[in-house]
Amino acid sequence: MNAEKLSKRLETVASFVPTGAIIADIGSDHAYLPCYLINKKIAKKAIAGEVVKGPFESAVRQVREAGLMHKISVRLADGLDAIDESDKVDTITIAGMGGPLIVSILDKKPAVLQNVTRLILQPNIHAKVIRQWGLDNGWAILDEVILEEDEKIYEVIVLQRGEMTLTEEEILLGKYLLNEKSETFIKKWTKEVENWKRVLESIEQAESSSSIIAKRGELLHLIALVEGIIENEKA
């Protein structure tokens, strides 16, 4: 992967960036995504934010080598601290982190989001936390994608300003992904149910306590909920 040829995962993230956007890529690593978006004339300006010194230096080097220092500002900062109001950022991308970490980044600096109209988020795990956050904070799901790359399954969630309602199933599985029920979706949730069953087996051996009883009930509920959906699809 490089600034000319992104991974399938980052290419999917890039596909949701509006033409003419001023973008902040938080946790930008090598700044491949901002470089790609500027080179393809999708984004007008970009910020590459990185909290770790090594990746920050890699991003600076990448942007300099690409001759894009006038278009991309690389900043060593924690999360949304990389963004200043004067930047007029309208689109934020955060990719390659867990859902809870992404949400904690968004929650730390809510004022930064005031002028932002689109969030493109790619959680590695716990995508449901992002859907719940959107529900609680006035963001609606514009689109969702599930994809597999290098034997790993990823979800991309695109949020825009607005209200939405989601059922328990839609928070967990994704409203749009539920409608499509792709092969990748079925594969992901079949594996998840198998994992839950393994955990259930292990706790059945444990000494009973209020927390064990609660966990057992939660797992049984999740297994029944997801199995009902994937079994209907297989049938």
Image: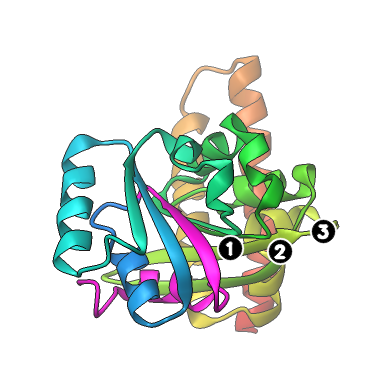
Q: Which residue is mark 2?
A: 141
Q: Which amino acid lies under the numbered mark 1 shown in the image of this protein?
A: Ile
Q: Position of residue 76 (x, y in %)?
A: 31, 37
Q: Which residue is mark 1?
A: 157
Magenta-tinted stretch: 1-27
| Secondary structure found at label 2 | strand
Q: Which residue is mark 3?
A: 162
Q: From the image, which quarter does the C terminus lie in?
A: bottom right
Magenta region includes residue 106: no
Q: Is residue 111 above or below residue 10?
A: above
Residue displayed at 66% across by 36% down: 110
Q: For residue 73, which numbered disc appears in the image?
A: none
Q: From the image, which quarter does the N terminus lie in?
A: bottom left
Q: Which amino acid lies under the numbered mark 3 shown in the image of this protein?
A: Gly
Position of residue 149 in the picture relative to residue 159 (left or right): left
Residue displayed at 57% across by 75% down: 18
Residue displayed at 40% across by 33% down: 78
Residue mark closest to the camera, 2 vs 3? 3
Q: 10 Å neighbourhood of mark 2: few (<14), some, or many (≥20)?
A: many
Tag 1–tag 2 contact (CB < 8 Å)? yes
Determine if residue 189 is in view.
no
Q: 10 Å neighbourhood of mark 1: few (<14), some, or many (≥20)?
A: many
